[in-house]
Amino acid sequence: MKVGLFDFQNEALDELQTKLKVARQLASIDNPQVISFSAPTGAGKTIVMTALFEDIFYGEPGFDAQSDAIILWISDMPELNEQTRLKIEGMSDRIRVRQLVNIDSDFDARELEGGNVYFINTQKLGNDKLLTRQGDSRTFPIWETFTNTAKSLPDRFYVVIDEAHRGMRTSTSTTDAKTIMQRFLLGNSDVGLSKMPMVIGVSATPKRFEELLSGTTHTVHKVYIKAEDVRESGLLKDRILIDYPEIPVQAETTMLIEATNKWLEMSNRWSEYCVKEKEDQEVNPIMVIQVQDGTDEILTKTDLGDCLVAIESVLGRRLRDGEVVHNFNEVGDLNINEHSIRYVEASRIQENQNIKVVFFKLSLSTGWDCPRAEVMMSFRRAEDHTYIAQLLGRMVRTPLARRIDIDANLNDVYLYLPHYNQEAVLSVIEDLNSSEDVPPTETGTSREQVTLNRREGIEEVFEAMNELVTYRVNKARQQSSLRRLLGLARGLTHDKIEEALLDSVTSELVQQMKLEVQRLRDNSLFEEIGGQFNTVGLKRVAVKQGTTFVEDTSEYTISTASSDLEVHFQQAGRLLSNGLHMSYWKFNRDKSANDAKLEVIVLTKDHEGMTNLENFAKTRFNDLYTKYKREIFRLKEQRRKHYERLRLSYSDPQDIPWILSESIDFRRSVNAPSYEKHLYLEDDGSFKADLGPWEIDVINIELENDAVVGWLRNVDRKKWSLEIPYRDGGYVKPMFPDLLLVRKDSKGFLFDILEPHDPSLRDNAAKAVGLAEFAERHWGLFDRIQLIRKKKGADGTERYYRLDMGNDEVRQKVLAVTDNNQLDQIFELHSII
């Protein structure tokens, strides 16, 4: 693949392989197998499927290659097929362009040819279409071609149904296909199509697809990508912010001007970000304007000319040719206010960087994929809220396929609704949060969802906070230490932090491999393992003609052919990763090629040897990361995230620098109370938050201390939050302490972690131990690390009692705690007020 997969995509790929291994062993026309692949909007289903196609054709360890496999991709829209074909061509480095074949009306073959990915849409499969009829120079109707292929190669003919929820309506009986798409699942004797032995249905909403199959003999294997995994990946925007009039007034033009101002602001923010981070690609945001329907006499009831005037009043200039386009399917190019407004297909908008404004009615919700769409203005009435929800579900992809940490505003989508009241807006929010076809992006009004910026005048506080660390529990897929080490070395070389490091680390690993091979030879294990790969044992029997009587038997061995050895060598290379097998082969030029390859193969089959290599790589990774973490911290955001993923992809939780951005996203109620000295403030210089009673009491007590210069309300599960791991029931989980406090003394800044926690909660002991372990590892970075509870003292008065993990004696006692009763006893003896 030319592009890397996110962890959740790799996990889905692994699961698809596992399901397909079973399916292709069982698949036949009489025993059809179906994979239901549920991929939420924004999950990158085409990327996952492209990687799967590569593995089908070329194999992976444990997943045998089928170079003669046939893949048929079916959709109900020609435009979607073309998008998919171009994406596969652009993402795969192993599937060639000649292997991507469009089935056109002149296609005629008894069977589909192995090694290809074919594309067809249902519009070409109607009964009146050339493909489906015999004659007119056609020998095989396309239905017969599909059936012949299914019968000849049931274990390697993969039929992929894109958007598999479409055309899957059911009736009282599911024994007959009701639509063209259903024919591939249920068969259709009238046209001569059998059931397809292996089908992969891809959909964000698989319910209809699976319901159709529930009354059949198909075996259904399910692979689901979780919506929260997509959200965590950074592929989707964090929030949808909705603006509407506080009281019902005529506000169309006013809100269009406000939307244009926001679009212009986003354009400037993206420009500044791309320049600062030296991005290879620019991000040019688009404003989409949803207009009202028209009548028989007019195209739309919305005055497009007035819209252009309002937009130009904000820009302070005339809109240029090509900057404004439309997607009204019923007309071609328009002339409005002497502007030529071209018609552009929805799928072509994203690629045209010159497009800035798009007018449309409803059509963009189908075939629309434009991460550049940042701002939307809708002139439609409240009864159309379902269509608005559908469209927004297509607008939340992040332009750079990652979250932006530096500027929280760049992770938002803005929606302006002049004809909506609060009740109607809540309907939109409900649709966005309940519909299964909507991505998991936080939705709310701009009155409640705000962006906070760093408080001015405390730059030295944030500079000091750069030394702090956090954790990101279960945020990265586990990788072997070999893969992590080589990825780190390659990155540090690429970023010119130490340019010869990759060669140096590779040489070190090769030397370690040589030591492990020598150990195997010294223990006489090499020949024992290697004999399975460098020779093949054969038996010969002699049978007299005309009888089954065996006259003689003999056994002998022959050397394994180089091509067969090469297969094992490549499999070993995938286990070692990053071309390490080839590096070993090149470093051992004094040996024959087959001898060096056999050594690699044998080593990867030896558990002790691979464990030793892993341990060496783990230690070396930690040493290098510690040595260069300051240089990594100074890299641009995209590169820092690369190293962060490598750091976090180990089985045990790993600390990373806690990088607090210039702005953060925050949610509070409209009437939330204000607090002083917060590190981040709203545009008006205030900080408002909905704190719990204990949090309010604790922070008010702390703010009475003049040494306090600032504090942070640490929100659960935000990308910017302070996160600490703890173990509960055998699992590692994250906790998010409520408050971070910053104090200053004569020596500098002191950082405190304060966690008011109800003692009746089951997780008390586990979280206390987690805080103590964090303090044990990072005692030099934080001063007080306190678990706080409210209880009555000996005098009967309720006070807040604190157990400080920054105190060595307390910490050692808490580390030994196994249940809440023991923790309660420590609180009684060692807590302070």
Image: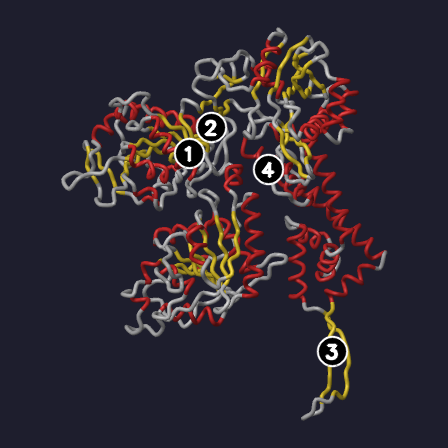
Q: Which mark is residue 539?
A: 3
Residue appearing at x 21%, y 34% in the figure: 339
Q: Nearer the viewer, mark 3 or mark 4?
A: 4
Residue 526: x %, y % from top left: 80, 59
Residue 283, numbered circle: 1
Name the residue type under label 2.
Tyr
Q: Amino acid at mark 3?
A: Lys
Number of other residues with Cα within 10 Å of mark 3, as a class: few under 14, some 14 to 19, many 20 or more: few
- Tags 2 and 4 touching, CB below 8 Å: no
Q: Residue 402 appears at what percent x and percent y? A: 50, 36
Does the CB distance between marks 1 and 2 fall below 8 Å? yes
Distance of mark 2 from mark 4, alpha carbons? Answer: 25 Å
Could you tell me if residue 27 is visible in this image? yes
Disc with the residue nearer the chain's start (1 vs 3): 1
Do callouts 3 and 2 mark residues in contact (Cβ within 8 Å)? no
| For discs 1 and 4, the disc positioned in front in the rendered view | 4
Residue pointed to by mark 4: 475
Question: In the depicted view, which residue is nearer to us: 707 or 622?
Answer: 707
* x and y percentages locating residue 41 in the rendered image: 44, 43
Residue lying at 45% horizontally and 36% vertically, measured from the top left: 398
Picture quadrant of residue 501: top right
Closer to the N terminus: mark 1 or mark 4? 1
Whether residue 115 is visible to the viewer of this picture, yes or no, is: no
Count of numbered badges drawn on the protein: 4
Residue at the location (47% across, 60% down)? 199
